[in-house]
Image: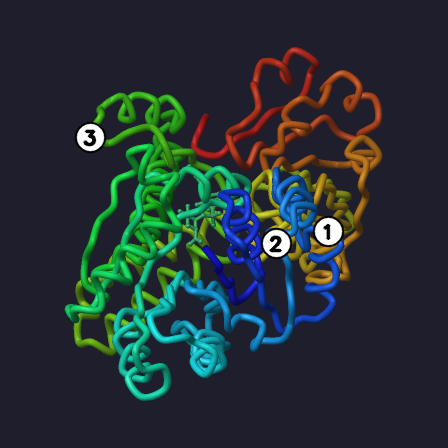
């Protein structure tokens, strides 16, 4: 099947390369010419495990190519729109201008019978609006809303073997052949038994907003429990293990710490609240305000805790922050709790050195005022306190004995409850965690 993928960011680049891996002939489109050139040279524009291999395979087999010229999509039968929907500056709402621009650019090049597939996370109602535009601008073609659930760091396997496929369809007759075309694209996953749900546009859009809101709520729930544990002398990790054994609750996404960040959960819960407000259903989602507030409180909590550990003042203290990215196995620093904490510590007078296996280039652009050091051991030299804020395996494997010899004070704060406390205390470190006495 000939496929186009419009937007080659964290979602689109992986989607394009994965579709080529499945045997389709794929053209990826992006307005960023430097990104297109890099992709055509087999260079992934961001760190995602497995993506360079897929790019290489797709480019060498000639099944995959990239372009900045939208008219190059015209022979494709299925067009995936994968552009971003960032938070609008100064507002909660999502900015859908890139989605609108992508569809508007695509319409003149859609053949009769071809299918546009929206994958971007959008406010409910967007798909119906776009379908309306298609009636005149791309007649005889069809729109399916097919939300994406991939996680950064696992994006390749999540795309090749998704846990479910959601098709948001119109109630027109043309929806049947359009869905059949998308079935052909996803033939491998469908034949492996992946469940496929056919719903209307609004439901498909809401599935994505609801899923991310649920995940955010789960994290903030356990972080709220961490606050109560701190106040009462309980241990949030043991609590999560115990409640997680109930199948109805489950242990996943119950890791307490500095909270969620990234380009999705924070902006998606805010966009969801904003959209519910427009629909007159704002009361239904007021709890998400609390979810957001609990999450942001974790960051200030760590700053306060670090101040206490430094004897009441951060001025002149040397703090080492292990981790810049919003989670391990990614180079994404968008709304990273780790970087946000590092910046707040620096603002309050500390000298902060940040280390990260993949995120330093992006972090430097975002917070040029912080010090960066690629080597974790070097970063810890003379530190008055070490903060683990992103649980990269290489940080968890650090040797407390060796680092103990180069720091100024053997004080570590585990912001992700990821370290083995005994491993550190047996080498005379003062180990502190969140939500654990
Ligand atoms: C999230 C969703 O998990 C994906 O299903 C969705 O497709 C994606 O957003 C999206 O909308 O595109 P992602 O942003 O890659 O994926 O990251 P997550 O794995 O969800 O982690 C989000 C944040 O929560 C990270 O900062 C992570 O450190 C934090 N987290 C996660 C916790 O603090 N505790 C946990 O127990 C789990």
Chain-order first, disc 2 or disc 3? 2
Comparing 31 with 399, the one in front is 31
Q: Which secondary structure, mark 3?
A: loop
**Residue found at x 49% / y 43%:** 22
Picture quadrant of residue 288: bottom left
Q: Is label 2 in contact with label 3 (beta carbons under 8 Å)?
A: no
Locate residue 261 relative to residue 37 in the image: left or right.
Answer: left
The residues tagged by marks 2 and 3 sit, at their Cα atoms, a distance apart of: 42 Å
Locate residue 383 relative to residue 6 in the image: left or right.
Answer: right
Mark 2 or mark 3, which is nearer to you? Answer: 2
Q: Which secondary structure, mark 2?
A: strand
Badge 1 density bin: few <14, some 14–19, many ≥20, Cα 10 Å: some
Picture quadrant of residue 419: top right
Q: Is label 3 in contact with label 1 (beta carbons under 8 Å)?
A: no
Residue lying at the far top in this picture: please name it.
Answer: 426
Q: Name the residue under label 1.
A: 43
The residues tagged by marks 1 and 2 sit, at their Cα atoms, a distance apart of: 13 Å
Q: Position of residue 103 (x, y in %)?
A: 43, 77
Q: Mark 2 points at which residue?
A: 64
Q: Mark 3 points at which residue?
A: 248
């Amino acid at each position: 099947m000939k496929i186009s993928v419009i937007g080659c960011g964290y979602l689109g680049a992986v989607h394009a390369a994965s579709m080529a891996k499945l045997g389709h002939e794929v053209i990826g489109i992006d307005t960023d010419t430097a990104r297109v050139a890099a992709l055509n040279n087999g260079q992934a524009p961001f760190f995602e495990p497995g993506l360079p291999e897929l790019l290489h395979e797709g480019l060498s087999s000639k099944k995959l190519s990239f372009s900045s010229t939208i008219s190059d999509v015209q022979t494709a039968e299925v067009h995936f729109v994968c552009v971003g929907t960032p938070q609008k500056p100064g507002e909660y709402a999502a900015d859908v201008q890139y989605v609108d621009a992508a569809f508007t650019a695509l319409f003149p090049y859609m053949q009769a019978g071809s299918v546009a597939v929206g994958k971007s996370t959008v406010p409910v109602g967007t798909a119906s609006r776009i379908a309306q535009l298609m009636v005149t601008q791309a007649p005889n073609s069809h729109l399916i809303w097919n939300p994406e659930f991939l996680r950064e760091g696992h994006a390749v396997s999540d795309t090749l073997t998704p846990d479910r496929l959601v098709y948001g369809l119109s109630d027109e007759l043309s929806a049947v052949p359009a869905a059949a075309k998308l079935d052909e694209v996803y033939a491998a996953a469908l034949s492996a038994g992946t469940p496929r749900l056919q719903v209307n546009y609004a439901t498909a859009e809401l599935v994505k907003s609801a899923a991310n809101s649920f995940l955010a709520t789960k994290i903030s729930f356990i972080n709220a429990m961490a606050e109560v544990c701190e106040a009462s002398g309980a241990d949030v990790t043991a609590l999560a293990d115990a409640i997680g054994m109930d199948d109805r609750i489950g242990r996943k996404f119950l890791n307490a710490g500095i909270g969620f960040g990234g380009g999705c959960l924070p902006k998606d819960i805010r966009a969801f609240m904003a959209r519910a407000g427009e629909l007159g259903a704002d009361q239904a989602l007021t709890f998400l305000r609390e979810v957001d507030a609990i999450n942001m409180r974790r960051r200030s909590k760590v700053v306060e805790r670090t101040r206490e550990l430094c004897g009441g003042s951060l001025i002149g203290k040397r703090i080492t922050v292990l981790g810049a990215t919003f989670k391990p196995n990614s180079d994404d620093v968008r709304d990273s709790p780790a970087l946000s904490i590092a910046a707040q510590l620096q603002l309050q007078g500390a000298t902060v050195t940040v280390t990260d296996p993949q995120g330093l280039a992006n972090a430097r652009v975002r917070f040029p005022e912080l010090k960066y050091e690629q080597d974790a051991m070097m970063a810890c030299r003379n530190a008055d306190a070490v903060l683990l804020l992103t649980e990269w395996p290489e940080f968890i494997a650090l040797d407390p004995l060796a680092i103990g010899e180069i720091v100024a004070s053997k004080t570590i704060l585990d912001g992700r409850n990821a370290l083995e406390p005994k491993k550190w205390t047996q080498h005379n470190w003062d180990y502190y965690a969140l939500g654990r006495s």
